Amino acid sequence: MRRAQLFIVLLICVMAPRAVQAQIVDSTVCDILANPQSFDGKIVRIKSVAFAGFEEFALKGEGCNQTVNAIWLAYPEGTKGKAGPAAFLRLQLAKNHPAAVVNVARSPVTLDKNKDFKDFDNFLSVPAKTSDLCLGCMKFTVGATLVGRLDGAKETGLIRDSGGKVIGLSGFGHLNRYSARLVLQSVSDISPQEIEYSKGKLAASDDSTSANRSFTPGVPTADQVKRGVDAFGAPGEDNGVSVGFGGANELSKDDSVNSNANSPDGLLFHSIFDSDRLKGPALQIAMAHIGTHIADARSQSIGVSNLFFFGAEFRAWQTSVLSAAGAKVKSLTLPGGYTIYSQAWSNPDFGKNADGAISGFLTNWVTITIPLKP
């Protein structure tokens, strides 16, 4: 009898890893983005390229034909990894917001912090050495096989009715604009690729820059920088905006749609800045940029408050250009080598060069495309 029991125990020990392995779903970034809700809660394995930047920490898709062709990447809480976005803004509905909210219970993920993970995290956290101010510029992207829990959503960002009233919130990552998020469980087969930083890089010929410019929010106004800074509120003011300094690569302790805190308009904005990567004028520019997102989301103007992702980012980068000029930096470059501001540009070329570089950056690096309609 004891031998039979021992045999059963040994059989369970042998078969258990295979059972766990069978639960992993092999997929691609594009297949997941085509229907992220169908993968929600599943453990998936993806071969992709991971990249970190100013507001980016994601897995890149190629030719997915989605508004955002990337899956947000997150480490489990308590990982203490080094890689991640230099700046980050997460939205939440406050306790006093009237929208009916259903928070999803998600199973915890334990990360295998083996050598592959440590190398993966290290490569993605090596800063690029550039002669000018480069916001969130890292030296490498990393190709890898990644396994983790996939969180999927049908809609992203603040959900509004026809009158502009916020009636819900969904999505993951920066600005809650990603329809899918991978909470990392393990990583293997890493292959770092050094990023090329060429001065003055603009949009490539296939970026449809002229078409992209037709969707931009127009000429920036002189008060955009002040408006962005003012969005954080006066010292001691409780306006629903929180500011943290550190990494933004982990799941939040309060990873839910709504919070137990209140806000004047029922919206909460959690901003985080990596103080090790953003110093001096870089932090000043980053805060004006993130502040523009906050001010736009709280705007009462239809066309500003409900900007689609490309337009929202374009407008914030316009503010960054104005902030860079005010800080008297010589030039401002973004991940991928896109220079969006230079003192050397002549006035006639300034707008064209800035718009082209912002467009190329958003299209090629952040992998945002323009939807058929906002």
Image (cartoon, rainbow, N blue to C red):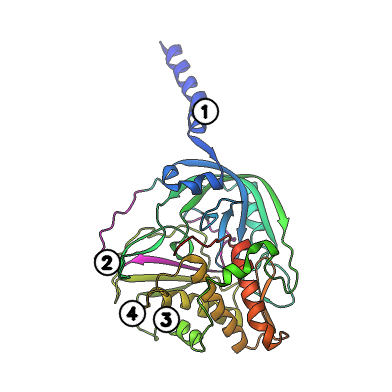
Q: Is residue 165 visible?
A: yes
Q: Which mark is residue 95?
A: 2
What is the number of the mark on residue 255? Answer: none
- Asked if the residue at tag 3 contacts the one at tag 2, i.e. Cβ–Cβ closer than 8 Å, the answer is no
Which one is earlier in the sequence, the residue at label 1 or at label 2? 1
Q: Look at the numbered disc 4 and give the secondary structure of its residue.
A: loop
Q: Amino acid at mark 1?
A: Arg
Earlier residue among tags 1 and 3: 1
User: Residue 66: where, in percent of width, then height?
Assistant: 52, 54
Nearest to viewer (mark 2 / mark 3)? 3
Q: Which residue is mark 4?
A: 238
The magenta stretch is 78-105
Task: Name the secondary structure under disc 1.
Answer: helix
- Which circle's residue, 4 or 1, is located before the other in the chain? 1
Q: CA distance from mark 2 to mark 3?
A: 21 Å
Single out the mark in the foreground, 4 or 3.
Answer: 3
- Residue 208, by quadrant, is bottom right
Using the image, determine if residue 196 lies above or below residue 288.
above
Looking at the rendered structure, the kind of residue marked 4 is Asp
Residue linked to disc 3: 231
Name the side, left or right, on which 84 lies relative to 264: right
Does dot 2 land on a helix, a strand or a loop? loop
Residue 336 position in % (x across, y down): 68, 65
